[in-house]
Image (cartoon, helix red, strand yellow):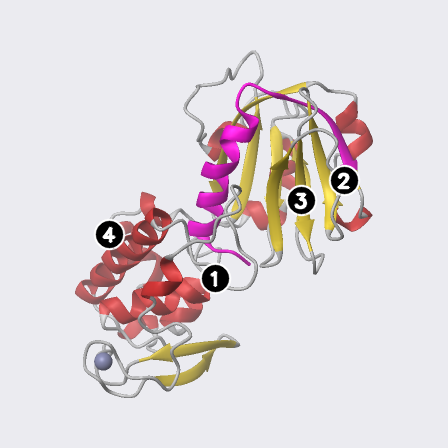
Amino acid sequence: MPELPEVETVARTLYPALAGRSLVRVEVLNPGTWQGAVSACELDAHMPLTFAGTGRRGKVLLVFFETDEFPDTGQGLCRPALLERGNDSAIRGLSFLLSLSCRLFAYPAGTAPERHTRLILHLDDGSMIFFDDARKFGYVRAVTPASLREWEFWRKLGPEPFELDDKAFGERFAGRGGAIKALLLDQSVIAGIGNIYADESCFRAGIRPDAPARSLCAADLGRLRAALVEVLEESIEACGSSIKDYRTARGDAGAFQNTFRVYGRSGKNCLVCGAKLRTAKIAGRTTVYCPNCQKA
Ligand SMILES: [Zn+2]
Protein backbone atom coordinates (compact mmCIF):
# COMPACT_ATOMS: atom_id res chain seq x y z
CA MET A 1 0.00 0.00 0.00
CA PRO A 2 1.41 3.45 -0.80
CA GLU A 3 2.37 5.30 2.36
CA LEU A 4 1.69 8.82 3.59
CA PRO A 5 4.03 10.73 1.22
CA GLU A 6 2.79 8.91 -1.89
CA VAL A 7 -0.90 9.41 -0.99
CA GLU A 8 -0.22 13.06 -0.13
CA THR A 9 1.45 13.48 -3.53
CA VAL A 10 -1.48 11.88 -5.37
CA ALA A 11 -3.88 14.20 -3.48
CA ARG A 12 -1.83 17.26 -4.46
CA THR A 13 -1.37 16.26 -8.09
CA LEU A 14 -4.98 15.11 -8.58
CA TYR A 15 -6.50 18.41 -7.42
CA PRO A 16 -5.78 20.44 -10.59
CA ALA A 17 -7.81 17.91 -12.64
CA LEU A 18 -10.81 18.37 -10.31
CA ALA A 19 -10.65 22.09 -9.50
CA GLY A 20 -13.80 23.94 -10.61
CA ARG A 21 -15.36 20.73 -11.97
CA SER A 22 -18.25 18.50 -10.91
CA LEU A 23 -18.70 14.76 -10.80
CA VAL A 24 -21.60 13.72 -13.04
CA ARG A 25 -21.27 9.92 -13.06
CA VAL A 26 -19.29 7.09 -11.52
CA GLU A 27 -18.77 4.12 -13.82
CA VAL A 28 -17.84 0.97 -11.91
CA LEU A 29 -16.11 -1.51 -14.24
CA ASN A 30 -15.08 -3.95 -11.50
CA PRO A 31 -17.81 -4.39 -8.84
CA GLY A 32 -15.28 -5.19 -6.07
CA THR A 33 -13.65 -1.78 -6.51
CA TRP A 34 -16.74 -0.01 -5.13
CA GLN A 35 -17.35 -0.65 -1.44
CA GLY A 36 -19.15 0.80 1.55
CA ALA A 37 -22.69 1.57 2.63
CA VAL A 38 -23.55 3.99 -0.20
CA SER A 39 -23.95 2.26 -3.57
CA ALA A 40 -22.79 3.90 -6.79
CA CYS A 41 -26.49 4.08 -7.83
CA GLU A 42 -27.40 5.95 -4.66
CA LEU A 43 -24.53 8.32 -5.29
CA ASP A 44 -25.91 8.99 -8.80
CA ALA A 45 -29.06 10.51 -7.28
CA HIS A 46 -26.96 13.29 -5.71
CA MET A 47 -25.11 14.36 -8.85
CA PRO A 48 -23.75 16.67 -10.03
CA LEU A 49 -21.40 16.99 -7.07
CA THR A 50 -18.95 19.88 -7.22
CA PHE A 51 -15.40 19.12 -6.10
CA ALA A 52 -14.09 21.20 -3.21
CA GLY A 53 -10.61 19.73 -2.87
CA THR A 54 -8.54 16.67 -2.13
CA GLY A 55 -6.83 15.44 1.00
CA ARG A 56 -5.51 12.50 2.95
CA ARG A 57 -5.98 10.75 6.28
CA GLY A 58 -3.19 8.26 7.02
CA LYS A 59 -2.89 6.30 3.78
CA VAL A 60 -6.48 7.06 2.69
CA LEU A 61 -6.81 9.40 -0.31
CA LEU A 62 -9.80 11.75 -0.03
CA VAL A 63 -11.79 13.77 -2.54
CA PHE A 64 -14.15 16.39 -1.06
CA PHE A 65 -17.45 17.65 -2.48
CA GLU A 66 -18.65 21.17 -1.93
CA THR A 67 -21.83 21.70 0.07
CA ASP A 68 -23.61 24.88 1.12
CA GLU A 69 -22.22 24.40 4.61
CA PHE A 70 -18.70 23.65 3.44
CA PRO A 71 -17.85 25.72 0.38
CA ASP A 72 -14.70 25.23 -1.67
CA THR A 73 -11.85 26.92 0.13
CA GLY A 74 -9.94 27.25 -3.12
CA GLN A 75 -6.86 25.91 -1.39
CA GLY A 76 -6.93 22.43 -2.89
CA LEU A 77 -6.06 20.43 0.20
CA CYS A 78 -8.86 19.93 2.73
CA ARG A 79 -8.77 18.67 6.28
CA PRO A 80 -10.28 15.18 6.80
CA ALA A 81 -12.20 16.31 9.90
CA LEU A 82 -14.49 18.30 7.54
CA LEU A 83 -15.89 15.01 6.22
CA GLU A 84 -17.22 14.02 9.62
CA ARG A 85 -19.32 17.16 10.06
CA GLY A 86 -22.85 17.96 8.94
CA ASN A 87 -25.91 15.87 8.20
CA ASP A 88 -25.28 12.14 8.77
CA SER A 89 -26.33 11.08 5.29
CA ALA A 90 -24.87 14.02 3.34
CA ILE A 91 -22.50 12.88 0.59
CA ARG A 92 -19.28 14.61 1.59
CA GLY A 93 -16.72 13.00 -0.67
CA LEU A 94 -14.98 9.86 -1.87
CA SER A 95 -12.29 7.81 -0.16
CA PHE A 96 -9.72 5.71 -2.01
CA LEU A 97 -7.70 2.94 -0.42
CA LEU A 98 -4.81 2.49 -2.82
CA SER A 99 -2.74 -0.62 -3.44
CA LEU A 100 0.76 -0.49 -4.90
CA SER A 101 -0.70 -1.20 -8.34
CA CYS A 102 -3.25 1.68 -8.21
CA ARG A 103 -3.05 4.74 -10.42
CA LEU A 104 -5.34 7.75 -10.72
CA PHE A 105 -4.91 9.70 -13.96
CA ALA A 106 -7.02 12.31 -15.73
CA TYR A 107 -7.93 11.77 -19.39
CA PRO A 108 -9.71 13.91 -22.01
CA ALA A 109 -13.25 13.12 -23.21
CA GLY A 110 -13.52 10.07 -25.42
CA THR A 111 -10.50 8.17 -24.06
CA ALA A 112 -11.15 4.41 -23.90
CA PRO A 113 -10.61 2.64 -20.57
CA GLU A 114 -7.37 0.71 -20.22
CA ARG A 115 -7.01 -2.98 -19.44
CA HIS A 116 -6.74 -2.40 -15.69
CA THR A 117 -9.22 0.49 -15.36
CA ARG A 118 -11.61 -0.53 -12.57
CA LEU A 119 -13.62 2.65 -12.10
CA ILE A 120 -14.12 5.93 -13.97
CA LEU A 121 -15.14 9.31 -12.54
CA HIS A 122 -16.89 11.27 -15.29
CA LEU A 123 -16.62 15.05 -14.91
CA ASP A 124 -18.96 17.76 -16.23
CA ASP A 125 -16.60 18.81 -19.06
CA GLY A 126 -16.37 15.24 -20.39
CA SER A 127 -12.93 14.62 -18.88
CA MET A 128 -12.45 11.46 -16.83
CA ILE A 129 -10.39 10.18 -13.94
CA PHE A 130 -9.43 6.52 -14.39
CA PHE A 131 -8.84 4.40 -11.32
CA ASP A 132 -6.48 1.71 -12.61
CA ASP A 133 -5.56 -1.24 -10.38
CA ALA A 134 -3.90 -4.31 -11.91
CA ARG A 135 -4.20 -6.41 -8.78
CA LYS A 136 -7.67 -5.24 -7.67
CA PHE A 137 -6.62 -4.65 -4.05
CA GLY A 138 -7.65 -0.98 -3.99
CA TYR A 139 -11.19 0.28 -3.48
CA VAL A 140 -13.35 3.39 -3.45
CA ARG A 141 -16.20 4.40 -1.12
CA ALA A 142 -18.61 7.30 -0.98
CA VAL A 143 -18.17 9.22 2.26
CA THR A 144 -20.97 10.39 4.52
CA PRO A 145 -20.43 11.34 8.18
CA ALA A 146 -22.37 8.20 9.19
CA SER A 147 -20.38 5.91 6.84
CA LEU A 148 -17.11 7.14 8.32
CA ARG A 149 -18.27 6.35 11.84
CA GLU A 150 -19.25 2.84 10.72
CA TRP A 151 -15.95 2.21 8.87
CA GLU A 152 -13.84 0.37 11.41
CA PHE A 153 -10.56 1.04 9.59
CA TRP A 154 -11.23 4.79 9.70
CA ARG A 155 -12.50 4.81 13.26
CA LYS A 156 -9.34 3.12 14.56
CA LEU A 157 -6.85 5.34 12.73
CA GLY A 158 -4.29 6.83 15.08
CA PRO A 159 -3.12 10.45 14.92
CA GLU A 160 -1.26 11.97 11.98
CA PRO A 161 2.55 12.08 12.43
CA PHE A 162 2.68 15.83 11.74
CA GLU A 163 0.15 16.58 14.48
CA LEU A 164 2.08 15.07 17.41
CA ASP A 165 4.58 16.87 19.61
CA ASP A 166 7.32 14.92 21.44
CA LYS A 167 5.13 14.33 24.48
CA ALA A 168 2.10 13.06 22.56
CA PHE A 169 4.30 10.94 20.26
CA GLY A 170 6.13 9.41 23.25
CA GLU A 171 2.84 8.52 24.91
CA ARG A 172 1.81 6.42 21.89
CA PHE A 173 4.83 4.14 22.40
CA ALA A 174 6.15 4.44 25.96
CA GLY A 175 5.92 1.27 28.05
CA ARG A 176 4.62 -0.89 25.21
CA GLY A 177 6.07 -4.36 24.72
CA GLY A 178 5.99 -4.63 20.93
CA ALA A 179 8.94 -3.93 18.63
CA ILE A 180 9.10 -0.24 17.79
CA LYS A 181 8.79 -0.96 14.07
CA ALA A 182 5.69 -3.13 14.57
CA LEU A 183 4.07 -0.23 16.45
CA LEU A 184 5.07 2.27 13.74
CA LEU A 185 3.32 0.05 11.18
CA ASP A 186 0.18 -0.24 13.33
CA GLN A 187 -2.26 2.30 11.83
CA SER A 188 -4.11 2.59 15.13
CA VAL A 189 -0.91 3.76 16.90
CA ILE A 190 0.07 6.31 14.24
CA ALA A 191 -1.47 6.74 10.79
CA GLY A 192 0.27 6.67 7.42
CA ILE A 193 3.53 4.78 8.07
CA GLY A 194 4.48 1.62 6.16
CA ASN A 195 7.62 -0.43 5.60
CA ILE A 196 9.68 2.22 3.82
CA TYR A 197 9.29 5.10 6.26
CA ALA A 198 9.43 2.86 9.35
CA ASP A 199 12.86 1.52 8.29
CA GLU A 200 14.20 4.88 7.13
CA SER A 201 13.10 6.74 10.27
CA CYS A 202 14.52 4.07 12.63
CA PHE A 203 17.84 4.30 10.78
CA ARG A 204 18.00 8.10 10.97
CA ALA A 205 17.11 7.97 14.68
CA GLY A 206 19.78 5.31 15.40
CA ILE A 207 17.16 2.94 16.80
CA ARG A 208 17.02 -0.76 16.09
CA PRO A 209 13.65 -1.61 14.54
CA ASP A 210 13.34 -4.70 16.74
CA ALA A 211 13.88 -2.75 19.98
CA PRO A 212 10.90 -3.16 22.32
CA ALA A 213 9.19 0.23 22.58
CA ARG A 214 9.39 0.11 26.36
CA SER A 215 13.21 -0.06 26.18
CA LEU A 216 13.32 3.39 24.55
CA CYS A 217 13.71 6.52 26.67
CA ALA A 218 12.06 9.88 26.02
CA ALA A 219 15.17 11.12 24.16
CA ASP A 220 15.12 8.05 21.85
CA LEU A 221 11.44 8.59 21.06
CA GLY A 222 12.05 12.30 20.52
CA ARG A 223 14.76 11.47 17.98
CA LEU A 224 12.44 8.98 16.30
CA ARG A 225 9.65 11.56 15.98
CA ALA A 226 12.04 14.11 14.49
CA ALA A 227 13.45 11.52 12.06
CA LEU A 228 9.99 10.38 11.03
CA VAL A 229 8.76 13.92 10.33
CA GLU A 230 11.99 14.69 8.45
CA VAL A 231 11.83 11.60 6.26
CA LEU A 232 8.12 12.10 5.48
CA GLU A 233 8.65 15.76 4.59
CA GLU A 234 11.66 14.99 2.40
CA SER A 235 9.69 12.30 0.60
CA ILE A 236 6.66 14.57 0.00
CA GLU A 237 9.10 17.13 -1.39
CA ALA A 238 10.43 14.41 -3.76
CA CYS A 239 6.83 13.39 -4.75
CA GLY A 240 7.12 10.08 -2.88
CA SER A 241 8.98 6.84 -3.58
CA SER A 242 8.34 4.99 -6.83
CA ILE A 243 8.65 1.29 -6.28
CA LYS A 244 6.50 -0.96 -8.46
CA ASP A 245 3.74 1.04 -10.18
CA TYR A 246 3.36 4.14 -8.03
CA ARG A 247 3.02 7.36 -10.03
CA THR A 248 1.70 10.81 -9.14
CA ALA A 249 -1.67 11.80 -10.64
CA ARG A 250 0.36 13.61 -13.33
CA GLY A 251 1.98 10.31 -14.32
CA ASP A 252 5.42 11.18 -12.95
CA ALA A 253 7.55 8.86 -10.83
CA GLY A 254 8.57 9.98 -7.36
CA ALA A 255 12.27 10.39 -6.58
CA PHE A 256 12.65 9.54 -2.90
CA GLN A 257 13.65 5.92 -3.68
CA ASN A 258 16.99 7.36 -4.83
CA THR A 259 17.79 8.48 -1.30
CA PHE A 260 16.85 5.33 0.64
CA ARG A 261 19.50 4.65 3.26
CA VAL A 262 18.32 1.18 4.35
CA TYR A 263 15.04 0.19 2.68
CA GLY A 264 15.74 -2.30 -0.12
CA ARG A 265 19.52 -2.16 0.60
CA SER A 266 19.78 -5.51 2.36
CA GLY A 267 23.37 -6.87 2.29
CA LYS A 268 24.81 -3.57 1.01
CA ASN A 269 27.11 -1.36 3.02
CA CYS A 270 25.80 1.29 5.40
CA LEU A 271 26.15 4.73 3.81
CA VAL A 272 27.25 6.17 7.16
CA CYS A 273 29.66 3.62 8.69
CA GLY A 274 30.28 1.06 5.92
CA ALA A 275 29.07 -1.96 7.95
CA LYS A 276 27.04 -4.58 6.10
CA LEU A 277 23.32 -3.91 6.53
CA ARG A 278 21.31 -6.70 8.15
CA THR A 279 17.87 -8.05 7.39
CA ALA A 280 15.22 -9.22 9.85
CA LYS A 281 11.49 -10.01 9.73
CA ILE A 282 9.44 -7.76 11.99
CA ALA A 283 5.64 -7.84 12.00
CA GLY A 284 5.93 -10.09 8.94
CA ARG A 285 7.78 -7.40 6.97
CA THR A 286 11.32 -7.47 5.63
CA THR A 287 13.34 -5.03 7.69
CA VAL A 288 16.79 -3.64 6.93
CA TYR A 289 19.00 -1.97 9.54
CA CYS A 290 22.61 -1.18 10.36
CA PRO A 291 23.92 -3.20 13.34
CA ASN A 292 26.49 -0.49 14.03
CA CYS A 293 24.50 2.78 13.63
CA GLN A 294 21.25 1.50 15.18
CA LYS A 295 21.95 0.63 18.78
CA ALA A 296 19.16 2.00 20.97
ZN1 LIG B 1 25.97 2.16 9.84
Q: In this picture, is 94 found above or below 259?
A: above
The mark closer to the camera, 1 or 4, is 1
Would you say residue 49 sits in the magenta stretch? no
Locate residue 23 relative to residue 174 in the image: left or right: right
* 81 to the left or right of 290: right
Which secondary structure, mark 1? loop
18 inside magenta stretch: yes
Residue 75 image-quadrant placement: top left
293 up-or-down from 121: above or below: below
Q: Disc 2 designates what residue?
A: 112
Of the residues tagged 4 and 3, which is closer to the observer?
A: 3
Q: Which residues are magenta?
A: 1-27
The local crowd at label 4, few if under 14, some if 14 to 19, many if 20 or more residues have their Cα within 10 Å, is few
Give me the C-alpha separation between circle 1 and circle 2.
Answer: 39 Å
Spatial CA span between label 1 and label 3:
27 Å
Q: Are marks 3 and 2 in contact (CB under 8 Å)?
A: no
Callout 1 crowding tier (Cα within 10 Å): few <14, some 14–19, many ≥20: some
Q: Amino acid at mark 1?
A: Asp
Q: Is residue 162 left or right of residue 107?
A: left
Q: Earlier in the sequence, mark 1 or mark 4?
A: 4
Q: Quadrant of residue 78?
A: top left
Q: CA distance from mark 1 to mark 4?
A: 19 Å
Q: Indicate which label's residue lies in the foreground, 3 or 2.
A: 2
On the image, the x and y values in percent for residue 242 come to 47, 59
Confirm whether residue 216 shows in the render.
yes
Residue in the picture at 72% in, 56% down = 136
The residue that label 3 is drawn on is: 131
* Residue receiving disc 1: 186
Residue at position x 39%, y 72% in the image: 263
